[in-house]
Image (cartoon, rainbow, N blue to C red):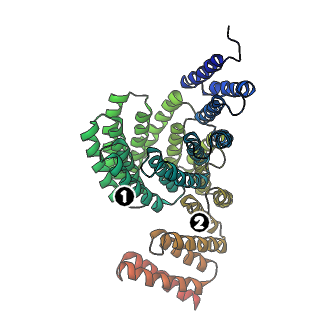
């Protein structure tokens, strides 16, 4: 007998905890690592390499259990020990900083993730060099979290720079180069260049088919991305057709219950709804949700995404009451699984707020929008796209309650932000400009409304020409408010 404190016994306990997690008993793995860490600290000491490894494993399995906040706490604790024992520049220390950055982002602290990855990138360039795989991985992660933080243009720029590095270091056909091309296409689409994103994704698909084959997982993933981009570019029928073909191939290659197959069923249902077959889409999402709960569980991210899409579809189809019910149920899951501050939780709260208004409860919608806006400003920042959308919703619902002055006040703030972030030529800025003019007039300031419409008319004539239908609408609005001001 070796006894409880023998190194081989401790190693066996570590292996048992790991295999528990791999077998799906993630909670059991966390519990086992907590007990093992306490034992190792007592037997080996805080700074023993095996103790540090156990701390790292505990953080990993906390993350695997969906406890992003617990993972952040564990990685912060581990990092403190690693810096003291191994030093700032040790590879294990740098890896722990990368893990900490990732889980900060997953808790909703996207600004913290960007900051941590930016600091880590500088250190990895200094320690490892520009071309080291870990440096390239950090560039990729930084670009991703910039996009999540709302700086999509910055993310596109960072991904383009990363792609140039990867082509030079790894070659045109390396899997990591392909992965960066995929990310860059997605970011271009999010930045508004959907046509360019479709073209880039189609080129990537041709290269992956040639290098990897038709049935490779990465090839199938690119087909999924391309179908989505086609739909976003306005080719909804093409997105439906491409998703249906992809579903048949994923069922054949991966099986009915694979995550990717389930995700494709979700995409197909979504695009069916966008194509006008709302009843068919609702039925497909309902069947899929039942399947996902059985295969993945209530709290799996894919299950939550499907609940969200079903709620969105109901809202878009005019079933506001059904959407409210679906969002309330979804929000309960998201708060429990992701936490109050996660971006997905905040987006769901914002959607729920608007749906309350569509059921006829404009005052409740305005109040809920104000609450979630305050939360978003604190967590995501003033300039995040989700924050701006919620600010727009708040202005709308204030107007619907009859609070014209309150609506005008919020639209004024929104217009200033839109002009600063995307420029006054952007459609979002123009919509805010017109809305501000409308609500200024409704609040009794007809002269102010006329002035705003006059400025907007001059701007739109310059952009679109004298005869554009939008210009004619603004011209009529200007005449109306000039008449009211006299």
Q: Nearer the viewer, residue 80 or 355?
A: 80
Q: Is residue 317 visible?
A: no
Label 1 CA crowd tier, 10 Å (few <14, some 14–19, many 20+)? many
Q: Which mark is residue 194?
A: 1
Q: Secondary structure at mark 2?
A: helix
Q: Which image quadrant: the N terminus?
A: top right
Task: Name above or below for residue 109 compared with residue 302.
Answer: below
Task: Name above or below for residue 323 compared with residue 469.
Answer: above
Label 2 CA crowd tier, 10 Å (few <14, some 14–19, many 20+)? many
Q: Nearer the viewer, mark 1 or mark 2?
A: 1
Residue bearing mark 2: 396
x then y, percent, for residue 186: 40, 52
In the displayed structure, does residue 332 sit left or right of residue 461? right
x then y, percent, for residue 313: 48, 48
Residue at the farthest right position: 42
Task: Name above or below for residue 217 compared with residue 370.
Answer: above
Q: Residue at x 45, y 33 (%)?
A: 259
């Amino acid at each position: 007998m070796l006894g409880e404190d023998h190194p081989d016994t401790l190693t066996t306990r570590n292996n048992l905890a790991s295999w528990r997690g791999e077998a799906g008993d993630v909670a059991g793995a966390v519990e086992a690592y907590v007990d093992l860490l306490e034992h190792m600290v007592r037997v080996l000491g805080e700074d023993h390499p095996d103790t540090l490894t156990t701390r790292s494993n505990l953080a990993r399995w906390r993350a695997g259990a969906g406890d992003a906040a617990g993972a952040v706490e564990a990685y912060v604790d581990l990092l403190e020990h690693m810096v003291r024992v191994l030093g700032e520049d040790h590879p294990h220390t740098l890896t722990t900083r990368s893990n900490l950055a990732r889980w900060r982002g997953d808790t909703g602290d996207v600004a913290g993730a960007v900051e941590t990855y930016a600091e880590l990138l500088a250190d990895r360039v200094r320690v490892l060099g520009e071309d080291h795989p870990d440096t390239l991985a950090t560039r990729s992660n930084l670009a991703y979290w910039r996009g999540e933080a709302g700086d999509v243009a910055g993310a596109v720029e960072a991904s383009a720079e990363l792609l140039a590095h990867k082509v030079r270091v790894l070659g045109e056909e390396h899997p990591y180069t392909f992965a960066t091309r995929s990310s860059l296409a997605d970011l271009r689409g999010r930045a508004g260049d959907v046509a360019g994103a479709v073209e880039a994704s189609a080129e990537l698909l041709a290269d992956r088919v040639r290098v990897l084959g038709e049935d490779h997982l990465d090839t199938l993933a690119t087909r999924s991305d391309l179908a989505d981009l086609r739909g976003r570019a306005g080719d909804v029928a093409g997105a439906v057709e491409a998703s249906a073909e992809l579903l048949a191939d994923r069922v054949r290659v991966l099986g009915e219950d694979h995550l990717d197959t389930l995700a494709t069923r979700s995409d197909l249902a979504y695009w069916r709804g966008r194509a006008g077959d709302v009843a068919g889409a609702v039925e497909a999402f309902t069947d899929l949700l039942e399947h996902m709960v059985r295969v993945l569980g209530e709290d799996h991210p894919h299950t939550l995404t499907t609940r969200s899409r079903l709620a969105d579809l109901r809202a878009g189809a005019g079933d506001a009451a059904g959407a409210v019910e679906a969002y309330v149920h979804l929000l309960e899951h998201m708060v429990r699984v992701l936490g109050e501050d996660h971006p997905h939780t905040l987006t769901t709260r914002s959607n729920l707020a608007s749906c309350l208004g569509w059921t006829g409860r404009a005052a409740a919608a305005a109040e809920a929008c104000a609450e979630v806006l305050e939360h978003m400003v604190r967590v995501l920042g003033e300039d995040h796209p989700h924050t701006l959308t919620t600010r727009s919703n708040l202005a709308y619902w204030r107007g619907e309650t009859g609070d014209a002055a309150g609506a005008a006040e919020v639209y004024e703030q929104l217009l200033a932000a839109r002009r600063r972030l995307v420029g006054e030529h952007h459609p979002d800025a123009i919509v805010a400009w017109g809305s501000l003019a409308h609500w200024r007039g409704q609040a009794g300031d007809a002269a102010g409304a006329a002035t705003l419409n006059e400025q907007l008319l001059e701007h739109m004539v310059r952009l679109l020409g004298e005869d554009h239908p939008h210009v004619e609408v603004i011209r009529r609005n200007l005449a109306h408010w000039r008449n009211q001001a006299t």
